[in-house]
Image: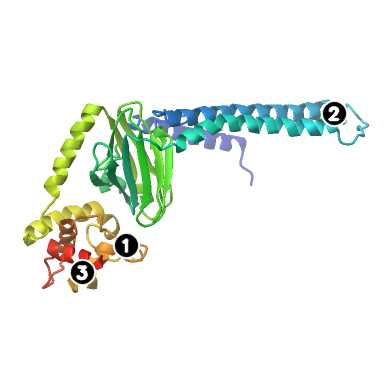
Amino acid sequence: MSIGKKTWQLAVTTALAAWAVTVSAAPVNDMPGGPAVRQYGMQAPVTSIASGQHFLHEVLLWVSAAIALLVFGVMLYSIVKHRKSNNPRPAEFHESTAVEITWTIIPLLIVIGLGIVATGEIVAQKDTSNPDLTVKVTGYQWRWGYDYLKGEGEGISFLSSLSTPREQILNQQPKSDTYLSEVDNPLVVPVNKKIRVVTTANDVVHAWWVPAFGVKQDAYPGFVRDIWFRAEKVGTYRGHCAELCGKEHAFMPIVVNVVSDADYRTWVEDKKKAMAALLDDPNKEWQLAELQARGEKLFNANCASCHQASGKGVPGAFPALAAAPVVLGPKEPHIEILLNGKGQAMPAWKQLSDVEIASIITYTRNAWGNQTPLNVVQPKEILAQRGAAK
């Protein structure tokens, strides 16, 4: 049975009305440092690299449009001018040397011209010499590690993880304007300074990508690659891992705060003071309560995305820690897994301090009903096993 015209009209009208309601109800706020609502085209560039990429994009777009217009114009002209009703007797001819030369030379000249325009931009993108600041970026499943290697701020090191509340991810709360694009510890760099970014990875292939900077570099385990940028405008800029890296790939955003020189110096001083305050003595005898309190925070920030805050894990993907043999058993295998990882699913966490690892292990050995005779792990035990591994 065929559907009548009025039925189709009603269906289309209903669909358009539903779409209009959805659009009108959608958030209208732009993401700070990210794409605008219903944005057309790429993000506004804030570096010379990104500006050059935008220029190349526009050149290629218009050259492609001109070629398409010419080709389809000739096709349309030929279809109309030489249709059968106009020319009942088709022309009979063989190849033309002039035409053959023409459609070989013209594309060659176009490619050479585009190559000349692009070469300067590509060379500039690869010139990482003489940076004002060098930062090593390490991809982890699923967060970023930042180490300031050279320049003002040398010695600063921290992890950057997604800070979007789990309730928003589970649709239990309204989503913020920066949903899935916000972190607890953003990368901070000074404005108008050349920043060299050295990328590597701890486990699988990741990719560090910030569209407003025009930079994207894969991070390979066991290898280093580098890129650079010079942000010309103070602000917050956002990106994401651009390489499919596992279950939480969508949950490892990048946030870069570009600040003035004075604000950067202040941040460096404050960060170094904060790092010094966290340099706990691994030989201190810690109490169960203080290790548990610290371990709970670290577990929720770094481990709960896989093992869940309840310790029940994800069946078939990530094991439960509640009543798990490795948690209830001897300390050494438990410490070994935290330091060196296990298989593809469990990454190594040796980048954490001895106190932090001891806190996480102590927390898991006392949470969710886990009770063992060996329920306290001291930082000096982590230090000893780390040294023995070396």
Q: Indicate the amino acid at tag 2.
A: His
- Find the distance from the CA under tag 1 to the CA under tag 2: 68 Å
Q: Residue 198, percent across and down?
A: 37, 44
Marks 3/2: CA distance? 82 Å
Judged from this view, the residue extending furthest toward the front is 130
Instruction: Out of 261 and 285, give the one closest to the viewer.
Output: 261
Residue 352 vs 196, above or below: the answer is below
Residue of label 1 = 346
Q: For mark 2, what is the residue?
A: 82
Distance from the alpha carbon under mark 3 to that under mark 1: 15 Å
User: Would you call the spot at circle 3 few (<14 residues within 10 Å), some (14-19), or many (20 or more)?
Assistant: many
Q: Are marks 1 and 2 in contact (CB under 8 Å)?
A: no
Residue occupying image coordinates x 86% and y 36%: 95
Tell me which residue sits at (17%, 66%) in the image: 384
Left or right: where does residue 363 sit relative to residue 245?
left
Q: Nearer the viewer, residue 164 or 273?
A: 273
- How dense is the environment of label 1, judged by Cα within 10 Å: few (below 14), some, or many (20 and up)? some
Q: Amino acid at mark 1?
A: Met
Tag 3–tag 1 contact (CB < 8 Å)? no
Q: Earlier in the sequence, mark 3 or mark 1?
A: 3
Residue type indicated by callout 3: Val
Q: Which residue is mark 3?
A: 327
Foreground label between 1 and 2: 1
Mark 3, mark 2: which one is toward the viewer? 3
